[in-house]
Image (cartoon, rainbow, N blue to C red):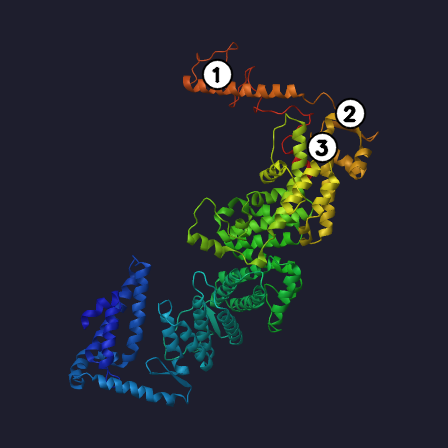
């Protein structure tokens, strides 16, 4: 028997086999002496190995360390039953082994005797009912439940976690019975922890969400657990606490102890409960009443998050407990993720309802009860705390949540400044996909906020990245894109579906497209008019998506009345380009989706004003070559704008060199400069000149490569060689103008470096 020492350390199968055999040989609570010798030596050998490991500089790998620890626990647990015999052996080994010959039972008990013992245990069952109750297992054996046996039952359940062919529902029923008989707080906490974990195991499949009744039960039990911890301040659940090994007795407070520490993570339970709710909402059809009913459970989760925060705040007051900062950060982040996308009124109601379920004397030091009346202040406090006490992903997400909330509540300039100073746009690709999705959502919300403020250029510029890609659904996690030309593996598809946001968090994609196309129209139509009347201007595209739609619309032989948002915008674009600004306003105003925005009437007034101004700019770009002078009053009447506003728009166009004209304030007229516009022949001559110079440049470069820049290769009359350059640009008389396709000097009708943008911004 003694030869099993090494085997017991490397693998436990032989040790388990030995123990199973010994059970049959135990007589009167005493095991064979040779077995006692074996397990005593095995324990000594193990202790020796552990002592060597502590002083050895080369540590064993994690797998071996875990295996060694498991064997240690198993031996320790097994040897407890024979501790008195082991102590006798260690006191005097020789005397112990000699006496064994006289006392040892010569023959093992017959199988009939074992059956008799089983029957005896079964008979004892009814007597135990006086203490609690008893159940019968599948083999007909009585399973007694008593406060003393709770820990043994829990140990067995914990050890079976993760194994196949385990009846989890049966385990849950067992633990529900145990909760009824658990009297002391320690046992209550232990049973509830194991019970909640086992319920979560039911929903650990890849696709299926956790059953609703199990979720409800877990939510109730977690609430009970937090209440017990609140009432019993001397019991604390900590991530770094050591496990209690003795199943025979429960831990008690010593003279120097302040707390009974129980291993576990309250924040992990809260996170898992929240995640399971999200999974459930993902799998429910959002257009049914079931989704609304399920959504009401969010209040319960939010209340648990608040209770969890209060619990961590309480235990962090004692520095001796060494509560990790990360746990508190995770709870606060969860709370923030539940409120950042909601309107202030909804957040206020949610907060008030949650605080009602917390005892009146309890308050939070981070987020006092008074903050529930001011949601914007609450969001700021939560985010500021995470800025100061966290780093990495949590900090980035906190910042994005705050920007999102500000943008949702029309605080555009604050949101924009925060977005720019965060520098997240530079390193967002380094974060996880969930954070990238949040970044996209925040960007869209900032763009929509700019639009509501009437900042058309800023709105279009912000929304360009998301809406110009044609992948809005995917980028905002609001639907799985159908990949036409690429094969998506089932694993990728599953991951994609898991990332999807619940329906109540969605941003309306139709509204988003409508805003983007309207902004693009207001910028592109004047630009098209400008490039159309001045052929020498370099062609510029603000939105490729919009241009494609416009070209497609123009190719249509017959266009009926607009049917959807896109049709309305396209027909409005056509009307605006033709100078029919009133018609354009009617088309834009008849889009029904504007009603979904807050203060829809104000937005329609803002859009009408923007269309009038852009109509004026379009008119001036189109008809400037045909006028010598033009009265501001005439334009004011034509576009129903105030003379001052007309003068302002014209002044901007002149200052940004978009219009070759002067404003005569005495006569209140625009005087157009003649002779600066190029004729068709002049434009073509300029284009030919640029192409010829580019060709010469290419030829010289080719020649230079072949001759390797030798002096005699290409001599010019002025003595300069083709190989000589200044800053990569030719400087000879026949060289091209710098930049290849240069625009004429200021004074024409050309568009120079971002002038349109400057004009719109100004």
| CB under 8 Å between discs 1 and 3 | no
Label 3, label 2: how far apart the Cα atoms are: 17 Å
Q: Which residue is mark 1?
A: 722
Q: Which residue is mark 3?
A: 653
Tell me the residue at 47%/78% (across/down): 185
Judged by depth in the image, the label closer to the viewer, 3 or 2, is: 2
Label 2, label 1: how far apart the Cα atoms are: 48 Å
Check disc 2: other Cα within 10 Å, few if <14, some if 14-19, many if 20+.
few
Please provide percent x and percent y for residue 30. Answer: 24, 83
Q: Residue furthest right?
A: 667
Identify the element where label 1 is drawn: loop
Image quadrant where one finds the N terminus: bottom left
| Mark carried by residue 564 | none
Q: Residue furthest top?
A: 717
Name the image quarter holding residue 678.
top right
Q: Is residue 98 left or right of residue 273?
A: left
Is residue 335 visible in the rendered image? The answer is yes
Total residue callouts: 3
Judged by depth in the image, the label closer to the viewer, 1 or 3, is: 3
| Mark carried by residue 628 | 2
């Amino acid at each position: 028997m003694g030869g099993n020492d090494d085997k017991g350390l490397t693998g436990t199968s032989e040790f388990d086999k030995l123990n199973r055999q010994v059970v049959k040989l135990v007589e009167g609570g005493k095991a064979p002496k040779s077995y006692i010798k074996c397990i005593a030596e095995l324990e000594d050998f193990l202790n020796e190995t552990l002592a060597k490991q502590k002083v050895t500089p080369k540590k064993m790998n994690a797998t071996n360390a875990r295996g060694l620890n498991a064997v240690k626990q198993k031996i320790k647990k097994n040897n407890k039953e024979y501790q008195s015999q082991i102590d006798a052996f260690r006191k005097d080994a020789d005397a112990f082994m000699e006496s064994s010959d006289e006392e040892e039972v010569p023959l093992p008990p017959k199988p009939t005797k074992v059956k008799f013992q089983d029957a005896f245990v079964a008979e004892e069952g009814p007597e135990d009912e006086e203490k609690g109750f008893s159940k019968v297992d599948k083999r007909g054996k009585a399973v007694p439940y008593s406060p003393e046996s709770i820990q043994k039952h829990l140990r067995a359940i914990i050890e079976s976690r993760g194994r196949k062919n385990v009846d989890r529902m049966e385990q849950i029923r067992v633990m529900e019975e145990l909760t009824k008989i658990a009297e002391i707080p320690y046992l209550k906490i232990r049973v509830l922890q194991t019970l909640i974990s086992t319920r979560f195991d039911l929903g650990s499949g890849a696709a299926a969400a956790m059953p609703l009744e199990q979720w409800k039960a877990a939510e109730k039990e977690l609430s009970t657990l937090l209440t017990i911890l609140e009432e019993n301040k001397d019991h604390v659940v900590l991530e770094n606490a050591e496990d209690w090994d003795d199943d025979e007795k429960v831990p008690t407070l010593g003279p120097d102890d302040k707390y009974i520490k129980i291993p576990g993570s309250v924040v992990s339970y809260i996170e898992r409960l929240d995640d399971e709710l999200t999974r459930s909402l993902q799998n429910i059809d959002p257009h049914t009443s079931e989704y609304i009913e399920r959504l009401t459970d969010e209040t319960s989760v939010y209340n648990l998050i608040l209770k969890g925060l209060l619990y961590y705040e309480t235990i962090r007051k004692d520095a001796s407990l060494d509560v990790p900062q990360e746990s508190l950060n995770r709870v606060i982040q969860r709370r923030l993720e539940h409120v950042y996308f909601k309107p202030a009124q909804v957040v206020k109601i949610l907060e008030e309802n949650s605080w009602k379920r917390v005892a009146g004397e309890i308050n939070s030091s981070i987020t006092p009860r008074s903050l529930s009346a001011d949601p914007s202040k609450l969001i700021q406090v939560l985010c500021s705390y995470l800025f100061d006490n966290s780093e990495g992903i949590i900090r980035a997400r906190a910042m994005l949540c705050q920007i999102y909330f500000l943008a949702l509540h029309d605080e555009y300039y604050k949101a924009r400044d925060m977005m720019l100073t965060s520098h997240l746009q530079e390193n967002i690709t380094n974060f996880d996909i969930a954070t990238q999705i949040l970044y996209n959502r925040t960007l869209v919300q900032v763009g929509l906020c700019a639009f509501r403020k009437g900042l058309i250029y800023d709105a279009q510029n912000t929304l360009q990245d998301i809406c110009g890609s044609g992948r809005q659904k995917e980028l905002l996690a609001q639907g799985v894109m159908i990949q036409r030309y690429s094969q998506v593996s089932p694993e990728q598809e599953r991951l994609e579906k898991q990332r999807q946001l619940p329906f109540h968090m969605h941003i309306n994609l139709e509204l988003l497209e409508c805003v983007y196309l309207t902004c693009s129209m207001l910028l592109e139509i004047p630009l098209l008019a400008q490039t159309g009347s001045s052929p020498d201007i370099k062609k510029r595209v603000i939105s490729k998506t919009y241009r494609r739609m416009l070209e497609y619309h123009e190719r249509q032989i017959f266009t009926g009345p607009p049917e959807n948002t896109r049709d309305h915008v396209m027909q409005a674009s056509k009307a605006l380009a033709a100078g029919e600004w009133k018609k354009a306003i009617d088309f834009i105003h008849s889009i029904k989706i504007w009603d979904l925005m807050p203060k829809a009437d104000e937005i329609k007034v803002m859009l009408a004003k923007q269309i009038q101004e852009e109509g004026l700019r379009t008119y001036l770009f189109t008809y400037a070559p045909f006028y010598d002078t033009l009265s501001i009053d005439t334009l004011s009447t034509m576009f129903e704008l105030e003379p001052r506003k007309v003068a302002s728009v014209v002044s901007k166009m002149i200052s940004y060199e978009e219009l070759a004209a002067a404003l005569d304030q005495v006569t209140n007229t625009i005087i157009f400069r003649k002779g600066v516009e190029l004729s068709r022949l002049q434009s073509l001559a300029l284009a030919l000149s640029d192409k010829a110079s580019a060709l010469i440049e290419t030829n010289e470069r080719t020649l230079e490569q072949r001759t390797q820049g030798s002096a005699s290769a290409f001599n010019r009359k002025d003595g300069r060689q083709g190989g000589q350059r200044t800053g990569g640009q030719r400087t000879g008389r026949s060289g091209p103008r710098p930049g290849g396709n240069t625009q004429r000097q200021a004074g024409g009708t050309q568009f120079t470096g971002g002038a349109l943008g400057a004009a719109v911004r100004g």
